[in-house]
Amino acid sequence: MSGGYFFWFAWTSWIVITFFVPKSKVRTKLAVVLLLLIIMSGIQFTIGGQAINASVIFLQMIGYFLVRRSKGTTLLYVCMGTWVIAAAYAGFHFIEVFDPVVLIVDRIWLLGPIIAVLVLLLAVDRRKRFSFVILGFTHGEWLVTFGFRHSYHPVELGSFASLDVFMVSSFLIVCWSALEWLATWIASITDRRKQTSSHPSAS
């Protein structure tokens, strides 16, 4: 069922953030954003005959907000990186329609990891990864929508199937970032123990 992954990951993340993460401004903002995203996903409207899911507009606004302070070469890199992700996202859809192949793996678990890997390669900074995946996904959705607008295969901008891909990509990015943090934490603990053992206290 389209939207199943989206709602499962979104609600699970909201519950974890709300009830298990220590209170802070960041926690509150994340919880509010997730709740608004879930609400927005149920709002659809039409402009010029094009069906649009409000969640995509909401995500795009968040993406622009996250990169609002980027300037110069940093902003240029963000733009180039997000458009690389958007092109890969749109290219997958075009190949899927115009040169169909039999997919043994669910397309969500095929496209989701592709987007996640691109984000991890392009954004080393863990804090910038969400802006990359959000803007890459939303711009990719616009490319797909305009590409199919006058074809026999019109699509909804921000369909639940697309939101599934976005949420799977985000989940994989969070998991990888958590593993990186864990590796860094273990390395710091190991270094402390080595320093302690190399400088024993005088008896």
Image (cartoon, grey):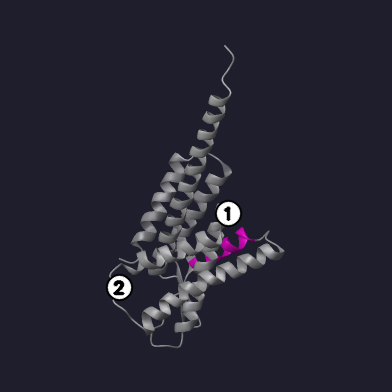
Q: In the image shown, does 169 or 39 lie closer to the viewer?
A: 169
Q: Amino acid at mark 1?
A: Asp
Say whether disc 1 or disc 2 marks the residue closer to the N-terminus: 2
The residue sitting at 53% across, 25% down in the picture is 197
Q: Is residue 48 magenta?
A: no
Measuring from the top left, give residue 44's x and y in whole percent: 44, 70
The residue labelled by disc 2 is 103
Q: In the image shown, does 66 or 203 lie closer to the viewer?
A: 203
Measuring from the top left, give residue 22's x and y in whole percent: 50, 38
Q: Along the horizontal axis of the image, is 39 left or right of 65?
A: left
Residue located farthest toward the right when viewing the structure as drawn: 72
Q: Is residue 84 above or below residue 11?
A: below
The residue labelled by disc 1 is 125
Neighbour tally class for label 1: few under 14, some 14-19, many 20 plus, Cα within 10 Å: few
Q: In the image shown, does 75 or 65 lie closer to the viewer?
A: 75
Q: Secondary structure at mark 1?
A: loop
Neighbour tally class for label 2: few under 14, some 14-19, many 20 plus, Cα within 10 Å: few
The residue sitting at 33% across, 81% down in the picture is 100
Q: Which residues are magenta?
A: 56-67
The residue sitting at 47% across, 79% down in the picture is 145
The residue sitting at 47% across, 59% down in the picture is 37
Q: Along the horizontal axis of the image, is 99 left or right of 49?
A: left
Q: Is residue 63 above or below residue 157?
A: above
